[in-house]
Image (tube, grey):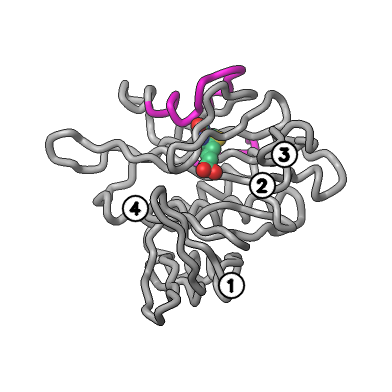
Amino acid sequence: AGPLAGCLVGSQLACLDVIDSTNTECKRRAMVGAPEGLVVLAEEQTGGRGRLGRSFQSPRGCGLYLSALLRPHAEPAAVTDFTAWVAVAVCDGIEAACGIRPRIKWTNDIVLNGRKLVGILTELGLESETNSLQYLVTGIGVNVNHTPEDFSPDIRDMAGSLAMELGHPVRRVELAAAIIRALDRMYRSFPQDKQRYLDQYRADCLTQGNRVQLVTPVSRQEAYALEIDDQFRLVVELEDGTRKALSAGEVSVRGM
Ligand code: BTN
């Protein structure tokens, strides 16, 4: 039995050399009936996509760029916190493969020593007439063996890689298997083991207790991050004393 024996996530693997985006490829395959559990991996992405319309730098050979196709039987509203579960699973996978547990910056960046290691982008496929959930693609980009020169100068101060932080290269195949196994375990627990993932998310998340800047395309606001509520939202206190619970996708948080 291979390292993914018994796993639904990773029951079919597509290992590609170059692709525009593993998320886009996974969606293309989802629309022509690809099975739940398909994982698309690529050595290099020419159009890696991030949240809020940003790009995700995906240089050849040093990263892990993968997307999983899932078909949860749930309403679209029931998967709004899915990416937070994925973030916990990715921390589990990195810990299993590398022996260190990175932390989470709300909502779903994974950081180590203050540098971003992992970005996660979840996209939903909705049935056009009923708006019901047809499929979900969750894409994970891990900076594994990058050196600082592999990042463009504009992100070099913020981005890091596992190799840079650990001081030695990491075997990508083993890391990929550990992350896919952790995703599989998480998906089997979704949504019934919410308390475990919520507790772990709170333990892993660095954002609560910090002053943050709330950034939207049109505004920027100072706030104090109080806690993660039971819907994985970030509860903040604004400068006028009012409290607000922020959902993923509404804002991004800076300054920590
Ligand atoms: C972010 O940091 O804003 C999310 C980045 C997500 C990047 C991954 S890499 C694999 C998958 N394919 C993509 O085009 N994006 C995700």
Mark 2 sits on what residue?
117
The residues bearing labels 1 and 3 have C-alpha atoms spaced at a distance of 28 Å
Name the residue rendered at 86%, 43% in the picture.
Answer: 168
The residues bearing labels 3 and 4 have C-alpha atoms spaced at a distance of 28 Å
Amino acid type indicated by mark 4: Val
Mark 4 sits on what residue?
79
Q: Does the magenta stretch include residue 15?
A: yes
First of labels 2, 1 by sequence position: 2
Does residue 160 appear left or right of residue 131 in this picture?
right
Question: If the image is split into quadrants, where does the N terminus sit?
Answer: top right
First of labels 4, 1 by sequence position: 4
Does residue 193 appear left or right of residue 163 in this picture?
left
Name the residue rendered at 37%, 23% in the picture.
Answer: 28
In this view, 74 is above or below 176: below
First of labels 1, 3 by sequence position: 3
Task: Report the span colored magenta.
Answer: 1-27
Q: Can residue 142 be seen in this view?
A: yes
Of 163 and 236, the residue lying toward us: 236
Mark 1 sits on what residue?
210
Q: What element carries label 4?
A: helix
